[in-house]
Amino acid sequence: MIKGMIAAMILTGLVGGGGAAVQAQDPEAGGVRRVGPANAMFSDVVWVGDVAYLSGTMAPVDVPADTAKGTPARYTTDTRAQAIAAIKAIEATLKKQGLGLGDIVQMTAFLSGDPAKNGVMDLDGWNAAYRMYFGTTEQPNKPVRATVQVARLVSETGRIELMVVAARPARGPHAMPATARVERPLR
């Protein structure tokens, strides 16, 4: 298997790729395809068959690092604004993969405590951003979702990081119509 992975990496340009975006598929890995820069610590997207797993995504920082002053990049916006920007970043990544927000089947939101809310996550801000993109007239699909508060994100001023799993819609005679929705009442 290792030889197969090395051969796939060489053939697809992962070795010596100089950081260019690549898509590699290990023929022995059962259809696993990794997408992202060759020199990155982890993949941006991993495909397993028709299912795409996206790495955690945060909003782009609104204040870049200042190396002259020695200050790190940071956020000055609240959870809602950061969530909107993170969802837009996810949407852009999905679009490059031929998918959209409606193809997301699972979402996990990691929220850090908001100093303006005595260290408690801003669930209202996150839900307000979420409702702009999921369960709307334009995009009625809603993924399964979990939201957890974490002690801290990678950026001290970051308020939310999202991880999603998306699935390519089935095509053909066994595909469920896009309009088919099964709703069960809550108990």
Image (cartoon, rainbow, N blue to C red):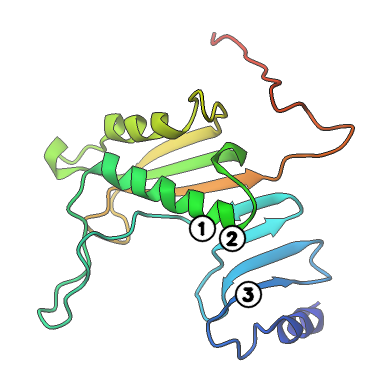
Q: Amino acid at mark 2?
A: Val
Q: Earlier in the sequence, mark 2 or mark 3?
A: 3
Q: Earlier in the sequence, mark 3 or mark 1?
A: 3
Cβ–Cβ under 8 Å for marks 1 and 2: yes
- Alpha carbon of mark 2 to alpha carbon of mark 3: how far? 11 Å
Above or below: residue 111 compared with residue 52:
above
Residue receiving disc 2: 45
Q: Earlier in the sequence, mark 1 or mark 2?
A: 2
Residue 83, given in percent of the width and then of the height, sits at: 34, 44
Residue receiving disc 1: 55
Does residue 57 appear left or right of residue 65 in this picture?
A: right
Above or below: residue 68 compared with residue 53:
below
Residue receiving disc 3: 22
Secondary structure at numbered mark 1: loop
Instruction: Residue at the far right: name it.
Output: 173
- Alpha carbon of mark 3 to alpha carbon of mark 1: how far? 16 Å
Secondary structure at numbered mark 3: strand
Question: Is residue 54 shown to the viewer in this render?
Answer: no
Does residue 78 appear left or right of residue 21 in this picture?
A: left
Secondary structure at numbered mark 2: strand
Q: Amino acid at mark 3?
A: Val
- Alpha carbon of mark 1 to alpha carbon of mark 2: how far? 6 Å
Q: Nearer the viewer, residue 71 or 20?
A: 20
Question: Is residue 28 shown to the viewer in this render?
Answer: yes
Marking on residue 154: none
Residue 165, given in percent of the width and then of the height, sits at: 59, 46
